[in-house]
Image: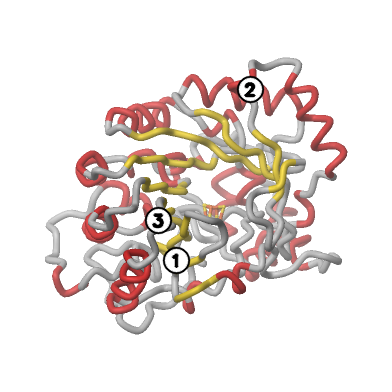
């Protein structure tokens, strides 16, 4: 996703850190005046590790890991911000954070049932950048880039270049939302929607909140986790100001991801009136033990985040080595239920293409 080339109608905004990022909400790029300094988060985004050799060197991995890392990188490029790397254990290839981002040679192996579009999103894309799967909600592909490239991502093959609207297409999408009173919630997704810059996001949110029947703004993001400095004054300005109810759904898979900086970023979001939820993916070698899942829920609550979903892996090509079979997943959750209060229990779900909601397991 990060290697998406700039599209028709898009001119890179000032200080855009990487080709194809911070891009999709192309709110008249001509309006954007150069800033004197990029925000700190953009500098961190620009400095993210994008070379498998550098990732292995930085983590002190033996040379044996490099060939696989390069093979996987050729399929889906490495991207890891330093702030996330700093939470990994040096010299430990089994570190649960590193496992989420380290490419492996296994990614090239075909596995029956693992495909490029496991959720059949192509069938639900009603116009460029707009995915309408569930009643009352629409999902807007707001940015084609992520701050981190997660190896298990179900959108690792997503055709962002075909789903990155120009300004005119955004206007058409917003018109369509205005004409459909059944829609009460807009979900900003990506990529990572917070990889777009704040002028672009403020432009989009101002137009969304002008649609009377829209009640909620939901943002699916991993940026506050991997670059907590993303939650800065500029972001809080437009977020705090909107009349829409705000929900940020974070994506955290392991308690080790939540350090003091993440907790502080979450506190800033809560002060802006945001409800914080988390969705995780059950991943072999990352969080597939009852202890890891219990620690994750406890740590989420310490950070003011409620566990929401625990997804089983979507069968995306290249990620089969992360799979945890359904029976084992149910067993983990049954064990978890004996240890945690109900409000710390995520719902174990699978997304089944064509279903009207997530499917509980
Ligand atoms: S899981 Fe989220 S943050 Fe990670 S690559 Fe996919 S869209 Fe980006």
Q: Residue at x 24, y 60 (%)?
A: 207
Q: Earlier in the sequence, mark 1 or mark 3?
A: 1
Q: Secondary structure at mark 1?
A: loop
* Image point (32%, 48%), residue name: 41
Given residues 36 and 315, the one toward you in this image is 315
Say which quadrant the C terminus sits in.
Answer: top right
Q: Is mark 3 within 8 Å of ligand 1?
A: no
Between 174 and 240, the one lying in front of the other is 174
Measured in 3D between alpha carbons, the distance from the residue under mark 1 to the one under mark 3, in whole angstroms, is: 8 Å
Query: Residue 83 appears at what percent x and percent y?
Result: 44, 41
Is label 1 in contact with label 3 (beta carbons under 8 Å)? no
Q: Is residue 107 visible?
A: yes
Residue that badge 2 annotates: 295
Earlier sequence position, callout 2 versus callout 1: 1
Please give the residue where the numbered disc 1 appears in the rendered image.
144
For residue 48, above or below residue 122: above
Residue visible at 82% across and 65% down in the picture: 113
Q: Residue at x 68, y 63 (%)?
A: 354
Tell me if label 2 and label 1 are in contact, CB under 8 Å.
no
Mark 2 closeness class: few <14, some 14–19, many ≥20 residues within 10 Å: some
| SS label for mark 3 | helix
Q: In the rendered structure, which disc, 3 or 2, sits on the residue that comes first in sequence?
A: 3
User: In the figure, is residue 71 to the left or right of 252?
Assistant: right
Percent coordinates x, y for residue 353 in the rendering: 69, 62
Ligand 1 is found in which quarter of the picture? Answer: bottom right
Would residue 158 be found to the left or right of residue 236 on screen?
right
Q: What residue is disc 3 on?
A: 193
On residue 211, the disc is none
**Closer to us: mark 3 or mark 2?**
3
Classify 10 Å Cα crowding around label 1: few (below 14), some (14-19), many (20 and above): many
């Amino acid at each position: 996703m990060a290697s998406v080339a700039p599209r028709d109608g898009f001119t890179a905004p000032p200080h855009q850190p990487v080709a194809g990022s911070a891009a999709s909400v192309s709110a008249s790029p001509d309006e954007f005046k150069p800033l004197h300094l990029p925000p700190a988060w953009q500098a961190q985004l620009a400095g993210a590790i994008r070379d498998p050799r550098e990732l292995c060197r930085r983590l002190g991995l033996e040379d044996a890991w490099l060939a696989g890392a390069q093979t996987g990188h050729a399929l889906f490029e490495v991207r890891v911000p330093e702030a996330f790397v700093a939470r990994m254990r040096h010299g430990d290839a089994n570190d649960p954070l590193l496992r989420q981002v380290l490419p492996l040679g296994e990614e090239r192996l075909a596995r029956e049932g693992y495909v490029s579009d496991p959720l059949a999103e192509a069938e639900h894309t009603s116009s460029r950048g707009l995915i309408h799967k569930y009643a009352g909600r629409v999902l807007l592909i707001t940015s084609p880039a992520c701050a981190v490239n997660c190896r298990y991502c179900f959108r690792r093959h997503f055709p962002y270049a075909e789903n990155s609207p120009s300004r005119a297409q955004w206007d058409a999408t917003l018109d369509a939302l205005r004409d459909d009173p059944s829609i009460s919630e807009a979900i900003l997704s990506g990529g990572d929607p917070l990889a777009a810059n704040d002028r672009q996001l403020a432009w989009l949110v101002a137009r969304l909140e002008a649609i009377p029947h829209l009640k909620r703004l939901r943002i699916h993001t991993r940026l506050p986790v991997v670059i907590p400095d993303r939650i800065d004054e500029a972001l809080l300005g437009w977020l705090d100001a909107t009349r829409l109810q705000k929900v940020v759904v974070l994506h955290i898979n392991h308690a080790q991801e939540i350090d003091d900086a993440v907790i502080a970023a979450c506190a800033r979001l809560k002060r802006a009136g945001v409800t914080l939820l988390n969705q995780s993916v059950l991943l072999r070698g990352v969080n597939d033990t009852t202890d890891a899942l219990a620690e994750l829920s406890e740590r989420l609550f310490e950070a003011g985040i409620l566990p929401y979903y625990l997804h089983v892996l979507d069968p995306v090509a290249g990620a089969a080595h992360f799979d945890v079979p359904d029976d084992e997943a149910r067993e983990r959750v049954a064990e978890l239920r004996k240890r945690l209060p109900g409000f710390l229990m995520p719902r174990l779900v699978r997304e089944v293409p064509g279903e009207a909601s997530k499917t509980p397991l």
